[in-house]
Amino acid sequence: MRVCLALICFVSFVAIVSGSRLVCAQGNRAWVEPFPPFRIAGNLYYVGSKGLASYLVESDDGCILINSSLEESVPLIRDSVEKLGFKFADIKILLISHAHWDHCAGSARIQEITGAKYMVMEGDVPVIESGGKADFQYGNSPGSFFPIAKVDRVLHDGDEVVLGKTRLVAHLTPGHTKGCTTWTTEVHDGGKRCNAVIIGSPNVNQGYRLVKNEAYPEIAEDFQKTFNALKKLPCDFFLGAHGDYFGLEKKYSRLEGANVSPFLDSDGYAAFIAEKEKTFQAEFEKQKNGK
């Protein structure tokens, strides 16, 4: 009887953990909804879903993938890569925006399929290599765990990732996670050299403690460092870890036949950062005042 009861409890636990992921995915259907892959500019392509952004960067020596998204996203990303005429095995380097399961849960599987080298910002490495258990906010939430992956290179602020003649720069923009990363690269658009910025995340998630956070004492300071850093980055093509950061759907609908790419949006970039900083400051003041 005790054995049966223990089995029932275990099955129930597994169902709750799996269910939390399922409910999350159902509540964010855009995360798993396919989106047409397309060239953003030059050697930079969109290969993500409607809600979870993944990017392919082409070089003369293979490709770089930014964001593996969910475990369930891997077939979708692979299909998008192949629709663009590339082979999935062309992916030589795997990067992420930050170590939350909706952006990195598919990494272990992509490593397995492609053999890509996984490069992660230092602050997020313990989270990746613990499958989410070292996360300051979600480390005790099984529904946020993901398959453990081996990090091949530990990145630091300002590090370059180079493949062939293609170069990306990793900018540490912490707060959302300790190693949240914003990626920049130069792309060619109509003969012009432009700056593409892929924002990691400046969001203060529900439940984040910005004051007296024992697991992350410097969180508020890090968020402010992030806003200061983002405001200094030159941006022509405004992109990010989620499609709704930069208006993916609306801009894509205007892409065909456009004389100027709708993804060229430096004003939108500045406005997005200003809005997120205002939201952070309001929450910080609220928590400082004990509300």
Image (spheres, rainbow, N blue to C red):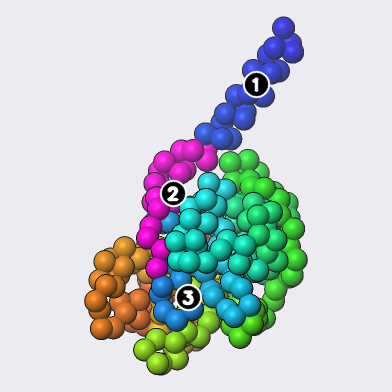
Query: Would you call the spot at circle 2 few (<14 residues within 10 Å), some (14-19), or many (20 or more)?
Result: some
Q: Is residue 226 magenta?
A: no
Whether pointer 1 and pointer 3 mark residues with C-beta atoms closer than 8 Å, the reply is no
Q: Earlier in the sequence, mark 1 or mark 3?
A: 1
Query: As shown in the figure, which amino acid type bears the numbered disc 1?
Result: Cys
Q: Earlier in the sequence, mark 2 or mark 1?
A: 1
Q: Which residues are magenta?
A: 20-38
State the SS at label 2: loop
Residue 275 falls in image quadrant: bottom left
> Identity of the amino acid at label 3?
Leu
Label 1: state its secondary structure: helix
Q: Earlier in the sequence, mark 3 or mark 2?
A: 2
The answer to whether residue 161 is visible is yes
Residue topped by disc 2: 32
- Report the side of 185 relative to 119 (left or right): left
Label 3 and label 2: CA atoms lie apart by 22 Å
Depth check: 198 or 252 in front?
Answer: 252
| Circle 1 residue | 9
Instruction: Give x and y (percent) for residue 145.
Output: 63, 46
Rendering coords of residue 67 (x, y %) = 55, 62
